[in-house]
Amino acid sequence: MLAIAGGKGGCGKTTVALGVAQALGTMGRRPLVVDTDRDMPNLHHRAGVDPTPGIDDITSATGPTAVAQRAATVENVDVLPCQTASAAAIGSALDSLSRCDRPVLLDCPAGAGPDTARPLRAADRTVLVSEPRRQSLTDTAKTAAMARMLDAPPVLTVLVSSDGSVDPSNLLSCPRTVHIPAVSRPLASDLTTPKYIDIANVLTKRNT
């Protein structure tokens, strides 16, 4: 289970989560992307699905996979929205997801508060997402520190809208960085799939 986390809202976490999931899907590992951001639950918008069913519809008899919806904007990916989910419902869903038999990507809230700690505590590893700006990187460093404390250490940093001139390794203490340039259609396969495939390859090798 991978947490897709960063310090600021709007830095591209949801797009990265869907892009990496699409790349994993091309490898035959149909992933599940889960929105855990109660304040800005926009995964359903980016994935082109309805806000419900979602996390609130998970029961002991109906698990996360049965509730998940097929994404419309990326291929071979299922998503689980959290449009109306409570903190308790997200916590219960994360418990269920720990038993999932396919890759799970957690689209995390921004920052380093309790709502972000919840999915980080459930995750095995963290992918950091930031813009190549000082404030965004500084905020992401706080998230990185919390991820390490919660035993979900960062394995990769994704810098979005980046020309490759910024090296965040010292600030974030993360072993690998992938730069994604500014594009008008960030999920378009002809523009960025190679980058997301690179990320997916790093993550799958890391986990094996």
Image (spheres, rainbow, N blue to C red):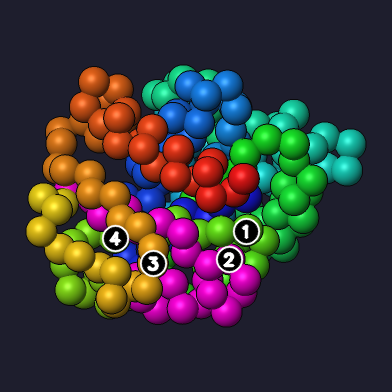
Q: Determine whether the residue tagged by mark 4 lies in a helix, strand or loop.
A: strand
The residue under label 3 is 174
**Mark 4 or mark 1, earlier in chain:** 1
The residue that mark 2 highlights is 152
Q: Residue at x 59, y 26 (%)?
A: 30
Q: Residue 90 location in percent, x, y?
A: 67, 56
Quarter holding residue 122: bottom right
How far across and how far down the image is residue 120, in percent?
58, 65
Report if residue 60 is visible in the image. Answer: yes
For the residue marked with disc 2, what is the amino acid?
A: Ala
Task: Give the Cα separation between the discs numbered 2 and 1.
Answer: 6 Å
Residues at marks 4 and 1, CA–CA distance in whole angstroms: 19 Å
The magenta segment? 140-161
How far from the left and from the top, in percent, is residue 128? Answer: 39, 60
Label 2: state its secondary structure: loop
Q: Label 2: how many residues lie within 10 Å, few (<14), some (14-19) or many (20+)?
A: many
Q: Is residue 106 left or right of residue 161?
A: right
